[in-house]
Image (spheres, grey):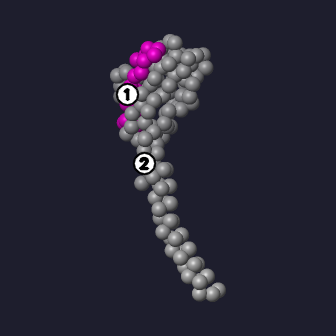
Amino acid sequence: MNRATKLAAIALGAAAMAVGPLAHTATAVGGKAPSLDGTFVAVPGAAFTTYGQPAAVVSEGGSLTFTNTDVIHHTVTSDALDPDTGSPVFGTGDDGKTPVEFGQSGDVSGVSELDPGTYTFHCDIHSNMTGSLVVVGSVA
Ligand SMILES: [Cu+2]
């Protein structure tokens, strides 16, 4: 290895070290998925198939809005019930099973209180409508 090659190799090594931590940071930021909160949609014909998307994804502490673009009303209602109140752990409206009229949107209450994990839900009116809510924790 001549002197020029040796210098080039050293420079390459330094460049790799400089890029390494930056790339790692970019990956970590991307992996955090910080802005998953959003909307879960029921599409036209949902009552006869499913909600039209299999899962809603929110970040821990985030919120979820249910948008009903079907032609009849639906709820998002957790399968799990609060052992103290007997009410859904999360769902549309204050009682967790308030129908969202077609063409309307409604908040899904209780979502911000959930620990990271996967939770199943259904439509309180159409039991064939089922879906999952994935709550993603932050990557420390
Ligand atoms: Cu429904």
Dot 2, how many residues are within 10 Å of its Cα: few (below 14), some (14-19), or many (20+)? Answer: some
Residue with the mark numbered 2: 138
Which secondary structure type mostly characterizes the magenta part of the structure? loop
At 50% from the left and 12% from the top, the residue drawn is: 72
Q: Secondary structure at mark 2?
A: loop
Dot 1, how many residues are within 10 Å of its Cα: few (below 14), some (14-19), or many (20+)? Answer: many
**Which residue of the protein is positioned furthest toward the top in this rendering?**
72
124 shown above or below 36: above
Location of residue 46 in the rendering, given as x and y in whole percent from the top left corner? 56, 19
Q: Secondary structure at mark 1?
A: strand
At 37% from the left and 21% from the top, the residue drawn is: 93
67 to the left or right of 3: left
The Cα atoms of the two marked residues, 1 and 2, are separated by: 21 Å
Magenta stretch: give its range. 96-116
Residue with the mark numbered 1: 109
Residue 54 is covered by the magenta coloring: no
Q: Amino acid at mark 2?
A: Ser
Location of residue 69 in the rendering, given as x and y in whole percent from the top left corner? 50, 19
31 shown above or below 127: below
At 56% from the left and 74% from the top, the residue drawn is: 12
**Which residue of the protein is positioned furthest toward the right in this rendering?**
1
**Which residue of the protein is positioned furthest toward the front in this rendering?**
4
Residue 83's disc number: none
Residue 102 is covered by the magenta coloring: yes
Identify the image quadrant of the N terminus: bottom right
Q: Is mark 2 within 8 Å of ligand 1?
A: no
> Which one is in front, 116 or 24?
24
Q: Amino acid at mark 1?
A: Ser
At 59% from the left and 87% from the top, the residue drawn is: 3
Residue 21 can be seen in this image: yes
